[in-house]
Amino acid sequence: MTDRFDILDAPDEFLAAPLRLTVDLSAIADNWREMARRSGKARAAAVVKADAYGLGIEDVGQVLYRAGARDFFVAVPAEGVTLRPYAPEARIFVLSGIWPGQEDVFFDNDLVPVIASEEQLAFWMALLSERGPYPCALHVDTGFNRLGLPMAEAIALTDDVSRPASLDPVLVMSHLACGDDPSSPMNRRQLESFRQVSAAFEGVDSSLAASAGTFLGADYHFDLTRPGIALYGGEAVNGVKNPMRSVIKAEARIIQVREAKAGETVSYGASHRLTRDSRLAIASVGYADGYLRNLSGSGIPLRQTGLAGARGAIAGQPVPVVGRVTMDQTIFDVTDLAAHGVRAGDYVELIGPAMPLDDVARAAGTIGYEMLTGLGLRYERLYIEGDD
Ligand SMILES: *Cc1c(COP(=O)(O)O)cnc(C)c1O
């Protein structure tokens, strides 16, 4: 079975790698355009924190910039520094804000701090009275209780005559706690609160929605949406079919295929006992590669909840993980594949078109975000621009 990820002319170090990750940059660009379309009259930013959700901020940033993104969000200044050459004219917002000692990194790289607390605001205002105008964004808390100024403080700022004239927010923003659950009453409550903030900062762009909020509809769009996970093909909203294109294929090489007898056990803790004569494929991936131990087929507390372990895919056929995932290897049951269906040297798809990211994440009791950002350093990466 071939798909857009089957690249015949890839470099040898990719074709022979124990672990390989293909990233379809065209799919990321398509997903951004789709989120921009769904943002209606609002502009769509691109959230590329955590190395673009583990997929590589340089390559991903560049393709998003080419697709038209001009507002980027990163978590920490170092990410902004890495992104800057790939997004020369873009506004790069740093979500963790600014601390004393970071002035140069912000000013030299034209990074915009997202002021996230009262301490940061005080520092920023003092800095501006010396330096003169420089753009910032204000994060206002509307119920998440993570980052942001209290609402009353933020609103009071709008007619505070003592504030430096050089305080010049280019964006006020807030973040939804329950955007992934369209039925949650929390969404409306935060929307009503943010409307007050947005109205107080008349003439300043407003932003409330991440990926999930963008799907909640036009009320939530304001001037700028901030999609992240949707760009990378992950599920943003629970319980609805994911409309985004899949973006990655992660594969591990099968080091050996072995026969084992009914009654024998597999992996650490002898945690899986074979109920039939079996063929096992030992793949070169483990929890050190973000193939989480909670994906194990057995031998971990999570399996007692009745949730099945993870599956990989070989030639499009699902193959279950058996026993515990170990640091560098994982064992798949390939008994049900045709006799010569799998050999040492073949690859098992861990995540990809045949094995959706969020299905794998669910098997580990987690979310696609955590799987992506945990992929680790051992994957040989290949960036492709497949068909649009
Ligand atoms: C991470 C983040 C986003 C992007 O969220 P997704 O759910 O990945 O779309 C947007 N805004 C803020 C403040 C964030 O922390």
Image (cartoon, rainbow, N blue to C red):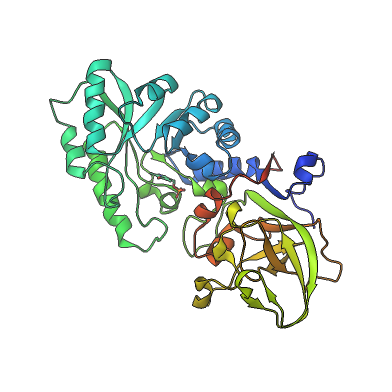
In the picture as drawn, the residue positioned furthest to the right comes out as 340
Q: Is residue 293 above or below residue 47?
A: below
In the picture as drawn, the residue positioned furthest to the front comes out as 269
Q: Position of residue 350 (x, y in %)?
A: 66, 58
Which residue is depicted at the point 30% across and 27% down?
Answer: 100
Q: Quadrant of residue 317?
A: bottom right
Q: Is residue 72 above or below residue 300?
A: above
Q: Is residue 362 above or below residue 227?
A: below
Q: Is residue 285 left or right of residue 244?
A: right
- Res. 10 visible in picture: no
Please tell me which residue lies in front, 189 or 232: 232
> Looking at the rendering, in which quadrant would you find the N terminus?
bottom right
Which residue is depicted at the point 15% across and 31% down?
Answer: 159
Q: Is residue 94 left or right of residue 246?
A: left
Please tell me which residue lies in front, 153 or 31: 153
- Res. 101 visible in picture: yes
Q: Is residue 346 above or below residue 11?
A: below
> Looking at the rendering, in which quadrant would you find the C terminus?
top right
Q: Position of residue 154 (x, y in %)?
A: 21, 38
In the picture as drawn, the residue positioned furthest to the top comes out as 131
Q: Quadrant of residue 104?
A: top left
Q: Position of residue 3 (x, y in %)?
A: 75, 52
Please tell me which residue lies in front, 283 or 207: 283
Q: Position of residue 233 (x, y in %)?
A: 57, 51
Total numbered circles:
0
Which residue is depicted at the point 30% across and 61% down?
Answer: 185
Which residue is depicted at the point 48% across and 45% down?
Answer: 228
